[in-house]
Amino acid sequence: MTELTIDNLNVWFGHGRDRVDAVKGATFSVEKGESFGLVGESGSGKSTILRAITGLVSTWSGQITVAGKPLGPKRDRAFYKTVQMVFQDPYASLHPRHSVDQVLGETLYLHGLGDIDKRVSKLLDDVGLGGKFRFRYPHQLSGGQRQRVAIARALAGEPEVLLLDEPTSALDVSVQAEILNLLTDLREDRGLTYLMVSHDLAVVGHMCERLAVMKGGEIVEVMSADALRHNQATHPYSQALLQASIGG
Amino acid sequence: MSETQTLRAWLLTDAPTSRRHAKLASLYKGWLSLRSNSMAMFGLAILIILGLIAAAAPLLAPHDPFFQDLGNRLGPLGAEDHVLGTDSLGRDILSRLIYGSRITLYIVTLVALIAPIAGLLVGTVSGYAGGWIDMILMRITDIFLAFPRLVLALAFVAALGAGIENAVLAISLTAWPPYARIARAETLTIRSSDFISAIRLQGAGPLRIITKHIWPLCISSLIVRVTLDMAGIILAAAGLGFLGLGAQPPSPEWGAMISEGRRFILDYWWVATMPGLAIFTVSLAFNLLGDGLRDVLDPKDSGQ
């Protein structure tokens, strides 16, 4: 079953002469339970696709379908319960004056869930943070711990789809692996669908079953991770990206 | 000793165990960094003393501030029974200063409650909503900003009638636009940050985002600005009093006292100087405290 379909998605910023087309005619679909990667260099429009799906960018055209329902210009509560996002920079995605407890408690409250006290500790356990982190403020946490809190927040409403916007690029290499393993485990446990943006082919190759390569706002190639591993990219840009990644 | 040590350790812990504990710990850390700033502590001490003086005015004042003794008018400094001398109607200046601290605190507190809150409301709504709401609110702010402050206050007092309450109202009306500007500027940088996007993705509405997520980050810079503005507010109130549009005689408001003493300033300088020194001391105290609070509360510095 298809969980997420993007059909001929265009996203632009500004209008008139200042108009910048960030995404042009993107089309792909993600199966339920699948992990799908979007790779490309900076400014290729990967993150913009996620922002259009979540409604953080409103200037888009085309069709986005989530769990069989096409999305209009506004997102409703049901959407936020189905789709959640983990942001790139855990230093920017947590409110500096809110403790972990407040962040998770408020999220649970907004999703209309009861028994908040128990759920907060359960969420913290699920993302590998013990109870001792519960009343800390973001400045008392490391980057990896912050990202775990951000993941816990995204999971609080028990979504089906998680949009991951380069969830490890702001972290140290050793912590990156921890977070990626956590995400892999969570997907298995909860049957989540991932749409993951990254500029790191190794990360996408490790995490995803299929991936789309983007360049200049367009999807140039959709292939399986197996094909990526066996160096079977067909588009010259994907081949160049692959070469650069192996060379690096 | 060991008990205070453990209390200290409890407050400085990295892993608080409850909501209250976390709140107290962060308050205590703020207090520690404020305490290390000796100038700010000096300012805070003066203000606490001012508060105590105002509270205990009837006990501290050696005389009735309104009692006139025309036979003993314009008494010199250090005179027996009248340490700071007497004014043109023979009233004890020290007692009038002590009672005047109540009026000063009253004005400062009211203005400090009205102006920043109004500014915060206008600024954050304007900054978060954007579009035509922003346009309208900011143009209104511009109009208020374009008037010279004391002149606008004068106009209000002239229209509403002289008196302390109207002076407070007039000062507040002229004091809110800078707060609105600050709050709007802060909101504009906060609203595009990831943590606001994140809470929007949890389905939070604009009311919740503004009150629970934007206000806490704006308030610290507003508090700093308020304490730095306090001096100006006291001076504006004194200025209105000086012009005869604030507190009315025989009320011992400091600005009005200077205004009265002005007539004799060449021969009896202390009559105007003593309330002037009082205004100066309190304004300085607020400025010092404001400077220290900025170091403690500025979100850009305390982020880590």
Image (spheres, rainbow, N blue to C red):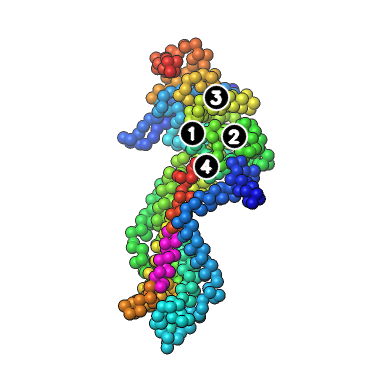
The local secondary structure at tag 2 comes to helix
- Disc 3, SS: helix
Q: Position of residue B248 (x, y in %)?
A: 43, 76
- Return the disc, 3 or 2, that comes first in the chain's sequence: 2
Residue A92 seen: yes
Residue bearing mark 3: A177
Compared to residue B143, the image places residue B107 above or below, namely: below
Give the spatial CA distance, label 3 vs label 2: 17 Å
Task: Report the magenta residues as a range.
Answer: B274-287
Residue that badge 2 annotates? A152
Local packing at callout 4 (Cα closer than 10 Å; few below 14, some 14-19, many 20+) is: many
Distance from Cα at disc 2 to Cα at disc 4? 14 Å
Q: In 3D space, how far apart are the residues under numbered discs 1 and 2 (Cα atoms)?
A: 15 Å
Residue A171 position, x and y percent, is 50, 29
Mark 1 or 2 closer to N-term? 1
* B280 is within the stretch colored magenta: yes
Q: Are marks 1 and 2 on the same chain?
A: yes
Q: Amino acid at mark 3?
A: Ala
